[in-house]
C-alpha cells in the first residue's frame, strides 16, 4: 500500500529551520499500531494523519513513541499541505481533534491556528527543576499538559543544558522555559524527553500556555514570540480569552510516497 507523505518546516519562512512535521493525508484511518510505526519511522517530533469528515477533516498526531492530544506545528504543516498542494478551496480549514475543533485561517502566506487557551496555575518550584536545569526559575506554573518555568532573562533560557534523564521523571507532557525577549515580546524553549523529544524546535501548542501568561504580564493581547532552539521559530500570538491565535509561515521540504504493508 502506497500513501502520500509530505514533510514541512513549520513556523519559519526558510528551509532547515522551524519545526519539521510529517503530514499523511488518508481516505480512512489506518490501524493505530501502523500509524505509530509510521511516526516512529519518520522520527520527527510529530506526524499528522488526516481523514475527511464531510467538508472538514479529522486530525491525529503521533510522536515517535505515542499519540498526543494537541500539536500546533503539525497542524500548521497540515494546513499548508491542504491549502498550497491539495487545492483546498477557501481561506479556512477545520480540523476535528481530541482537543476539539481547530480552525486554521490563511491570509496570504501566513497561517493562523485557533486553539483553546490553557489555564495555568502557580505551583511550587520542585527540586527536580533545579536538579535538571542547574538554575532556579523565578516562577513555576502547571497547565493542562505542561509545566512552565519563568526565568529572569533570555540569556538564561538560551544557556540551559537540561539533564533529560531527570526531566523524564516528571508526570507531565513536557516543560516550557520562558523569559522576556530582546527581539520579541517573549522567548521560550520546550523539553519533552518522556515523549521521545528531548527538545522540540518550535512548539505551537506550548503557546496556548505562554500567550495567556505573557498577555497578563505585559498588559497586551498581541505578542511576538521566538522559540530559541537551534532551528528557531517565529510566532505571532493573540490572546482572545478562551482561545489563542498562533500565526506563522511554513515551507515544503519533501513530497513523496511511503510503502507499508
Image: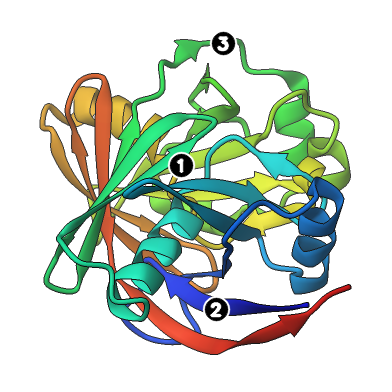
Q: Position of residue 247 (x, y in %)?
A: 25, 55
Pointer 2: residues within 10 angstroms few (<14), some, or many (20+)? Answer: many
Check disc 3 and report the residue beneath it. 123
What kind of colouring is applied to the model shown?
A: rainbow
Please tell me which residue lies in front, 55 or 128.
Answer: 55
Above or below, 189 relative to 238: below
Residue in view at x 77 percent, y 39 percent = 132
Circle 2: element type: strand
Q: Earlier in the sequence, mark 2 or mark 3?
A: 2
Residue in view at x 89 percent, y 73 percent = 261
Above or below, 62 relative to 240: below
Circle 3: element type: loop
Q: Position of residue 192 (x, y in %)?
A: 70, 45
| 140 left or right, relative to 199 | left
Question: In the figure, residue 161 lies in which quadrant?
Answer: bottom right
Of circles 1 and 2, which is in front? Answer: 2
Please tell me which residue lies in front, 1 or 193.
Answer: 1
Discs 3, 1 touching: Cβ within 8 Å:
no
Give the Cα separation between the discs numbered 2 and 3: 40 Å
Q: Is residue 134 visible?
A: no
Q: Earlier in the sequence, mark 3 or mark 1?
A: 3
Check disc 2 and report the residue beneath it. 6
Give the Cα separation between the discs numbered 1 and 2: 21 Å
Residue in view at x 62 percent, y 52 percent = 160
Check disc 1 and report the residue beneath it. 205
Q: Position of residue 143 (x, y in %)?
A: 51, 20
Above or below, 48 relative to 195: below
Of circles 2 and 3, which is in front? Answer: 2
| 199 left or right, relative to 37 | left
Q: Position of residue 173 (x, y in %)?
A: 68, 33
Amino acid at each position: 500500500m502506497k500513501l502520500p507523505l509530505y514533510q514541512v518546516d513549520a513556523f519559519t519562512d526558510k528551509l532547515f529551520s522551524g519545526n519539521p512535521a510529517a503530514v499523511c493525508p488518508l481516505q480512512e484511518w489506518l490501524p493505530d499500531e501502523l500509524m505509530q510505526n509510521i511516526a516512529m519511522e519518520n522520527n520527527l517530533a510529530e506526524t499528522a494523519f488526516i481523514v475527511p469528515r464531510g467538508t472538514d477533516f479529522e486530525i491525529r498526531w503521533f510522536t515517535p513513541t505515542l499519540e498526543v492530544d494537541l500539536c500546533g506545528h503539525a497542524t500548521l504543516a497540515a494546513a499548508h499541505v491542504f491549502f498550497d498542494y491539495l487545492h483546498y478551496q477557501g481561506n479556512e480549514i477545520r480540523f476535528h481533534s481530541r482537543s476539539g475543533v481547530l480552525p486554521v485561517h490563511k491570509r496570504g502566506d501566513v497561517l493562523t491556528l485557533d486553539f483553546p487557551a490553557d489555564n495555568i496555575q502557580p505551583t511550587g518550584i520542585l527540586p527536580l527543576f533545579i536538579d535538571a536545569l542547574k538554575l532556579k526559575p523565578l516562577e513555576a506554573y502547571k497547565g493542562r499538559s505542561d509545566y512552565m518555568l519563568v526565568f529572569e532573562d533570555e540569556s538564561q533560557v538560551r544557556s540551559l543544558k537540561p539533564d533529560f534523564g531527570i526531566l523524564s521523571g516528571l508526570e507531565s507532557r513536557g516543560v516550557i522555559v520562558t523569559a522576556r525577549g530582546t527581539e520579541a515580546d517573549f522567548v521560550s524553549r520546550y523539553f519533552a524527553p518522556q515523549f521521545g523529544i528531548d527538545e522540540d524546535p518550535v512548539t505551537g501548542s506550548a503557546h496556548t500556555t505562554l500567550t495567556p501568561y505573557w498577555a497578563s504580564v505585559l498588559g497586551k493581547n498581541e505578542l511576538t514570540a521566538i522559540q530559541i532552539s537551534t532551528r528557531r521559530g517565529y510566532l505571532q500570538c493573540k490572546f482572545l480569552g478562551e482561545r489563542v491565535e498562533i500565526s506563522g509561515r511554513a515551507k515544503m521540504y519533501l513530497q513523496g510516497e511511503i510503502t507499508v504493508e
